Image (tube, rainbow, N blue to C red):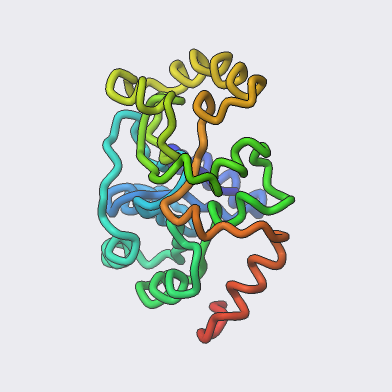
Amino acid sequence: MSFTFGCPDRTTIEQLQRARSCVVVSVTDAAEATLSDARGADALCVQGPLAGGHRATHQVAQEPRATGLEVLLRDVRDVCDLPLVAAGGITRREHIVAAMEAGAKAVQIGTVLLRSPESGASPLHKDALASDRFSETMVTCAFSGRFARGLVNRFMRDYHDVAPAAYPEVNQLTRPLRAAGAAAGDPDGIALWAGTGYRNAPVAAAAEIITTLWGEMQVKCPN
């Protein structure tokens, strides 16, 4: 059972563990890791700043840190001994090697799978990832009221500077606008979530992408 946007209280975690669940909490800095460890989490998903989609900060208005994933992993390792899963910006073999050398026991991938047939991303979203129209990503509250990284499009440019950190209120407010953008086939009117490595996302089956990444590895699979 994994959690993002915060850590459950100790009682909830203990109840899940008694039900034979392994509890994983996403963290973005050492302070969140310390809190999650103290509450009894079994493992941590350490999310770096290059991640696509929503940042896993525990507080809605908390500005996401820019600390690189490898440094962040070492910072978290300094404050707890829990197994760490590295996430954010992992799209190539060297990213996996660097994360595991920094203390991760496993890695989590997302953006690199977005153009696979198993992905839930819309065709509009998938096409945007390969389009020359979109050349950069940015972290914004414009779409949901929570900090999240996506391709810079018209909606983001228009509302980035005025959108408050207010989730889920902003998310509900913009939902009909995003739905209208999707219905119109307008990539400038929807959230195009993506990490910084989105250009590395191939059109291939998820199993093929994972097998290729793992097949390139020269490190022993962690226990």
The image quadrant that residue 162 belongs to is: top left
Q: Nearer the viewer, residue 53 or 194?
A: 194
Residue 150 appearing in the image: yes
Question: Relative to residue 220, is residue 99 drawn left or right?
Answer: left
Question: Relative to residue 61, is residue 124 drawn left or right?
Answer: right
Q: Position of residue 86 (x, y in %)?
A: 44, 62
Q: Nearer the viewer, residue 130 or 117?
A: 130
Question: Relative to residue 161, is residue 156 drawn left or right?
Answer: right
Q: Nearer the viewer, residue 203 or 26?
A: 203
Q: Is residue 145 above or below residue 107?
A: above
Q: Residue furthest front?
A: 132
Q: Is residue 173 above or below residue 119?
A: above
Q: Nearer the viewer, residue 111 or 198?
A: 198
- Residue at (45, 41) in percent of width and height: 134
Q: Position of residue 88 (x, y in %)?
A: 43, 55
- Residue at (53, 40) in percent of width and height: 12
Q: Position of residue 44 (x, y in %)?
A: 45, 56
Q: How many marks?
A: 0
Q: Position of residue 76 (x, y in %)?
A: 31, 61
- Residue at (41, 45) in percent of width and height: 135
Residue 4 appearing in the image: no
Q: Is residue 50 above or below residue 95?
A: above
The image quadrant that residue 223 belongs to is: bottom right
- Residue at (38, 45) in percent of width and height: 136
